[in-house]
Image: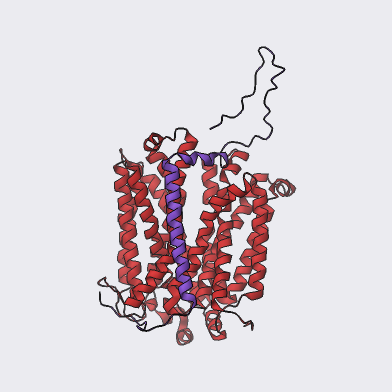
Amino acid sequence: MRNIKTHKVEQLIMAAVAFFWCFLLWFSSAAFVPTIASQFDLGVKGVALLASSAIWTAPIARPLAGWAADKFGAPKAFVLILVVTGAFSILSAHAATLGPAIGVTEYQFLFWTRVVVATAGISFVVGIQHVAQWFESEEMGTAEGLYAGTGNVGAGVGALLLPRIYGLDYHTAFIHLGIVAFIIALWILLRGVPAKSAEQAAMAKKTATLRDTAFVWTRHAAIALMLAYAMSFGLEIGMNAWLPGYYKMGFEEAIRELGFQSLQDVQIAAGSFAAVQSFNASLFRPFSGWISDIWQRKGWTPFPMISKHLDYAPRIHWLMFALLSITTTMILLTVAGLQNNLILSVLILALFGVTVSFGTGGTFAIVPLMFKERPGTATGFIGGVSCAGGIIYPLIYGEAAGWFEVGGIHWGYALVATFLFIPFILYFIWAMHWDVHPEEHGFGSKERWLGKGGQEQA
Amino acid sequence: MAGVSKVPKDYEYEPWYKYGVAFLFFEAALAIAVSIYALSMAFTGQAVEFKKKVTFEKPKATIEQPAPAREEPNSSTIDAPAKQ
């Protein structure tokens, strides 16, 4: 390991800045969708395709990023992600000349280079691993919360500031975003250190094997935490895509009564309501990590059946509380919608965003503690596969709208809560009932996946 | 709510921790401020202001106003985009 004098707070700031910028890159296309849509005459389906393409690579590439963070160290993984996505961001700004030069249309070149830029979102797992390698277990919730919450704000900041700074000139924005990514990569290259000790870095590297990956992916606790994260972060990104359309279709009359008459005005109002969820879900996330630390300090374990004897048991109970809160607010969203009460719906949505942040912050206050020897692999699986929720939930909401004659568009939340989230919670309770090493129980024994040598090693 | 916590009661956090907690309170306050801003903006109708900067309309760089002096009968004029 490199001999650089550093402090864990510097490493935390470095990880948070890198992740913030990656998040900005991830959703920078979305900030300019109106301009791109009008320039290339995209219809609703084209816009939806462009918006959803930002999530395509996450479920597959995040686990790979987690493995790379364990194997090569988080700083190298961060540098690689920033350089590649920064370069493609700059290339995408020159789609008009580069596209025809290689025999594709300008839009095709822009679309596919932006898909590569959107892989910047995989950096989340790299930073989680990095923070876990530097901070003590007592302060893990706050440290991980500060990292992830500050980084997640990149999406909201991009949506608010990029159109104001650059107007319709997305080309210049993409170039500037790419250049800053290079600068941050250089900073990490010079000052990044993979772990607080060489032993800790070596342990993570040693467990970054295919066998260890298979072992983690088959553990009940890892699957339960993945489902918990699908109930929170997967839900958050799915709602980001779904909510503007929901408010426009579900409350069009109520919005028009507020004075928003034209189609564009209704769209803007619906988008503003939807932003409430996005901001609360990301900015309250660090708060959730801190509350997890408080539950840990106070030793609160109120729920029956879940272990009360693990070192980090109160953190599991806090996450359980978060999962119940998310499920409750989902049902309340349906209730407010069926009453056609816009104000109640938006207020519940704000509360819903906070409960989602409880889930996201609560999950990653546990993961590094439970999977101490394989933080990157576990984070990659939990933070990656759960993103599939962002694709699945909006599809269910859309399908559910056709099943009911009246108010069908509002029923999706209650159906997802009842038929997906409640079974997820029951599985979570069962997976967390073991008092000793819950992370070792799963499909197939530890010996089967790791072999005798691997078992001794871990 | 009795439980088992392995964090010692007298555990002393490092100096950075209080600044970290202060920062997360700042972020939570920012989230509340943005929520209030977004809600008030939408409910009072001021959200329409956004439309001047973010719009689905095609950017029209070369729209020319008809020259007032040379107006011919039966000629078609180009309408400027409606101001909101």
Which residue is located at x 70 percent, y 22 percent?
A: B67
- Residue shown at 67% from the left, 12% from the top: B73
Residue farthest toward the top in the current orientation of the protein: B73
> Where A240 falls versus B65 (above or below)?
below
User: Which color mode does the image show?
Assistant: by chain
Which quarter of the image is occupied by the N terminus of chain A? bottom right
Spot occupied by residue B77 in the image (x, y as percentages of width and height): 65, 20
Left of A337 or right of it: where is A22?
right
Residue A76 in the image, given as x and y percentages of width and height: 62, 72
Q: Nearer the viewer, residue A98 or B78?
A: B78
Q: Quadrant of residue A285?
A: bottom left
Residue A34 x %, y %: 56, 42
Colour in which the image shows chain A: red
- Examine the rendering and report whether any part of residue A193 can be seen: yes
Which chain can be seen in purple? Answer: B
Q: x, y (%) of residue B2?
A: 25, 77
Q: Is residue B54 left or right of residue A353?
A: right
Q: Is residue B40 above or below residue B2?
A: above
Tell me which corner region of the image, top left, top right, bottom left or bottom right, holds residue A18.
bottom right
Residue situated in front as seen by the camera: A225 or B44: B44
**Residue at figure coordinates x 63%, y 64% from the top left:** A82
Q: At x 61% / y 36%, what residue is drawn?
A: B58
In the figure, A198 relative to A425: above or below?
below
Number of residue marks? 0
Choose top left, top right, bottom left or bottom right for residue A287. bottom left
Q: Is residue A378 visible?
A: no
